[in-house]
Amino acid sequence: FLGWASAGMSYRTACPAYCGSCCCPPLDSCCGVAGLPRGCIIIAGVDVAYGLVLIAVHAVLLSQVTGITDPNDSSWFVQRADLDLALFHNVDFSGLSRFTLLLVGVFYGVLVLSAAAFALHAMVSRQQSLVRPFLIAGWVQFSIYVLCSLLKGARVCRHREEHYPALEGSCGVLQYTFYQRFVAGVGLGLLMLWTLGSYASQTNVVSGATYTTVPADPLPMTSTYAVEPPATVATTLP
């Protein structure tokens, strides 16, 4: 999708790349209540909030690792955000220290916040040429979220007593509710990417100006054409 998203392609060719599926028609509005431009502004605002939450959660976890705060005093809200949103920071899988992984999470949150804030400013100022780069960044974020969630879901019972003692007491219930929120997050993320892809597929940027892409003629052109015979002129001999 990187090559398709960066190239100025026709409407029908770009739709699978932007929407993520060959059978995915572009949307006409965001959730049926707002236009695509306003919907993209809302999505960028949600991504800004997501970046702030990532920075806050990883910073709180870093304070617990470094001994600034007591890990036993961690609230259920922090543990829930750690389970659902934070990057995968279990030492037994990566081989790196937990401090290093959490520090990477803080920098990742800064990158998400910076990209989302820049995209929000660009969309408010109607700079539609930046929709495609923001769409690519959204797919990267979505892939990281899915990968980290799958890794944490497979090991949530193993780390429940150490990292999530304030959450559900039963391992089965904790794992079940986690996958429920994961499926909901995947659905919300795909809806946001679908909205961004629909808006991006309707614009084509050429030399700094934005044009609306018109669908190609569905009827193929043929190489033979019917030519009318030349008109005959009747003349009379004297």
Image (tube, rainbow, N blue to C red):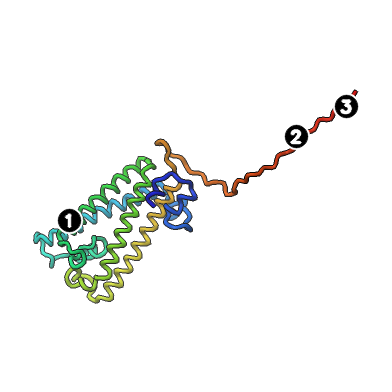
Residue 103: give its label.
1
Q: CA distance from mark 3 to mark 1?
A: 100 Å
- The earlier-in-sequence mark between 3 and 1 is 1
Q: Quadrant of residue 233?
A: top right
Q: Where does the image place residue 193, in percent across and percent down from the top left?
A: 38, 54
Are circles 3 and 1 on residues that touch, CB within 8 Å? no
* In the rendered image, the vertical position of residue 69 relative to residue 112, given as above or below: below
Q: Nearer the viewer, residue 1 or 87?
A: 1
Residue in the image at 25% along x and 50% along y: 111
Could you tell me the amino acid type at mark 2?
A: Pro
* In the rendered image, the vertical position of residue 4 relative to residue 78, given as above or below: above
Q: CA distance from mark 1 to mark 2?
A: 81 Å
Badge 2 local density, few (<14 within 10 Å), some, or many (20+)? few
- The earlier-in-sequence mark between 1 and 2 is 1
Q: Where does the image place residue 207, in percent across and percent down from the top left?
A: 41, 36
Residue in the image at 47% along x and 57% along y: 22
Badge 3 local density, few (<14 within 10 Å), some, or many (20+)? few
The residue indicated by pointer 3 is 236
* In the rendered image, the vertical position of residue 155 relative to residue 24, given as above or below: below
Question: Tag 1, which secondary structure?
Answer: helix
Point out the residue furthest to the left here: 67
Q: CA distance from mark 2 to mark 3?
A: 19 Å
The residue indicated by pointer 2 is 230
Which dot, 3 or 1, sits closer to the camera?
Answer: 3
- The earlier-in-sequence mark between 2 and 3 is 2
Residue in the image at 31% along x and 50% along y: 45
Are circles 1 and 2 on residues that touch, CB within 8 Å? no
Badge 1 local density, few (<14 within 10 Å), some, or many (20+)? some
Could you tell me the amino acid type at mark 1?
A: Leu
